[in-house]
Image (cartoon, rainbow, N blue to C red):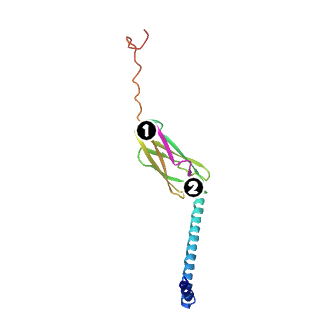
Amino acid sequence: MQAFSIFLYLNLSKPKFRFEMKKIFAVLVFVVSFAAFSFAQESKVEATVAKAQEAGPVMEFEATTVDYGSIEQGADPYRVFKFKNTGEEPLVIKHAKGSCGCTVPTYPKEPILPGETGEIKVRYDTNRVGPFNKTVTLTTNAVDERMTLIIKGKVEKKAPEPSGLPAKEGNPFGGGN
């Protein structure tokens, strides 16, 4: 241990070693300063993006998924997605498209002003038996230009309806005795 202490003392007292330590310290200070500057710039960019998002239209949905649940074949095919424009500019829905022909969206064609609400009405073909998981893609002028809505559920085959009431024996019209 004593030998190590002597070695350190002798090397620290040499001018060349002190110069090397100063170079290492200077490089370390430079790296730390550069990293701090980079993180500060990244925070400024994130703040600018956040401010831009607040300035334009913002489409906020109550829910982006609607579960039909288990429904009977031929049941009510319509479901509604409600939304609000929480931004500072009018919201325009440019286009809405279902993932297949069995999913048909209807959307407002006029601009939705800041603070106003709107609805996307979706019709699914409930005569198709089986589970389904479909999407509706919206194209808007909002900061998040594309929005995806999901409908899902399961259509159960409708039970066959009885063909009619049974007639009483002996009377083809089902009348009295």
Q: Which residue is mark 1?
A: 155
Name the front one of labels 1 and 2: 1
The location of residue 142, given as percent across then percent down, is: 54, 57
Identified by mark 1, the residue type is Val
Q: Is residue 54 visible?
A: yes
Residue shown at the point (40%, 21%) measured from the top left:
164
> Vertical placement of 64 versus 2: above or below?
above
Q: Which residues are magenta?
A: 60-70
The answer to which of marks 1 and 2 sits earlier in the sequence is 2
The location of residue 171, given as percent across then percent down, is: 39, 11
- For the N terminus, the quadrant is bottom right
Q: Which residue is mark 2?
A: 58
Residue shown at the point (60%, 50%) measured from the top left:
116
Q: Is residue 25 left or right of residue 98?
A: right
| Within-10-Å neighbours for mark 1: few <14, some 14–19, many 20+ | many
Question: Residue 35 sits in which quadrant?
Answer: bottom right
Task: Identify the element where label 2 is drawn.
Answer: loop
CA separation in Å, label 1 and label 2: 34 Å
The location of residue 32, given as percent across then percent down, is: 56, 76
The location of residue 26, given as percent across then percent down, is: 56, 82
